[in-house]
Image: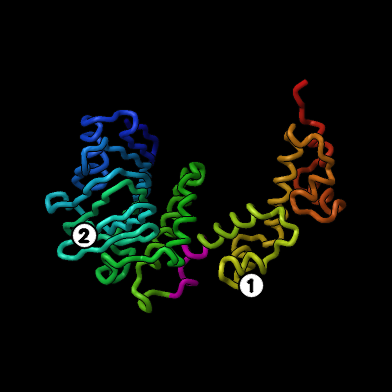
Amino acid sequence: MVSSSPAFLHVSTVAHPGRESVEAWRELFGHAICGLDIEPLGNRPFVSKAVVRVLPGLGVAQGMSSGAHYWRPSHRINSDDLVFVVNHSGHDLARMERREQTLSPGQAILFAADRVGGTTNAGTSRFTTLRIPRPVVPGADDSILRIVAPDNEALSLLGAYLGVLGDAEALAAPDTQERIVGHVHDLIAMAVEVPGKGPPAEERGGVAAARLRAIKRDIATNAADMELDVGQIAARHRVTPRYVQMLFAQTGTHFSEYLRTCRLAAAHQMLRAAAHRSKSIGDIALDVGFGNISYFNRAFRREFNASPSDVRAGVRTDP
């Protein structure tokens, strides 16, 4: 039912269907983790699973649930935290006190953990729930139960940035944990703020970090395109080329340097793969985005302290 490691918990009913598993889900995920009562809907088998990560100042649950009523009654209120819920699929009815909202796929909403309320999903839904301290969102009362649209920039950046939570090495360092939590706080605050009431996006460290992470992923995915340049990347991410260069400069590197590193890493991987033994080194250089073979050879040697031929010679193929 449950496997755990520091700051990590996996909860699932899949391996143990039936009423016993429902009770375990209710007690562990509902009562102990979320402070919620859970009541499955309908007569079909109840299936739910979630990955829970707990960091100082941040709790994250990502998973899925078949139809159920998730509710926080008054006797389960034990903090004044805020809970930010992102609905990835399905339609949820969100209620708090006398207010309610219908949550469509891609939308998000902010709850107050010190008030009676919850959600009902009639069918299977996928979700991300983030629990944060109330001071993270100044004037939070104005943002409670307001729908955050799927095209909200901060929400999009948050979805991409949360991938960093899968980096166990990064999360092992307390200072890195603190920085990541701060970035998530910034993005949630920006996503839910009432227009005109928050600081400019440029003043939020989390926004810059999330943008850079998204830009790096874009570059790594498309590095083989010989025409890829900072202008294309900037246009795709709706910022200026100068801003992209500034983001890289803040980390002590440059756009062109990161692009070259991605291409070299791809070439190194291909040279070591038996599946590409029939390709010439020149063809591999072209495949990963280098238009000049001589430049590729020089850059490769500087990066790996070995020539492409040296790296290839170290690969053994099956007879």
| Residue 151 falls in image quadrant | bottom left
Span highlighted in magenta in the image: 200-209
| Residue 274 falls in image quadrant | top right
Mark 2 residue type: Arg
Classify mark 1: residues with Cα within 10 Å, few (<14), some (14-19) or many (20+): few
Whether residue 280 is in magenta: the answer is no
Which residue sits at x=33%, y=37%?
11
Which residue sits at x=27%, y=41%?
29
Q: Where 142 sits versus 302, above or below?
A: below
**Residue 207 appears in the rendering:** yes
Image mark for residue 242: 1
Image mark for residue 87: none
Total numbered labels: 2
**Helix, strand or loop: magenta stretch:** helix
Mark 1 residue type: Arg
**Residue 307 appears in the rendering:** no
Give the labeled residue for mark 2.
95
The outermost residue toward the bottom is 196
Q: Which dot, 1 or 2, sits closer to the camera?
A: 2
**SS at mark 2?**
strand
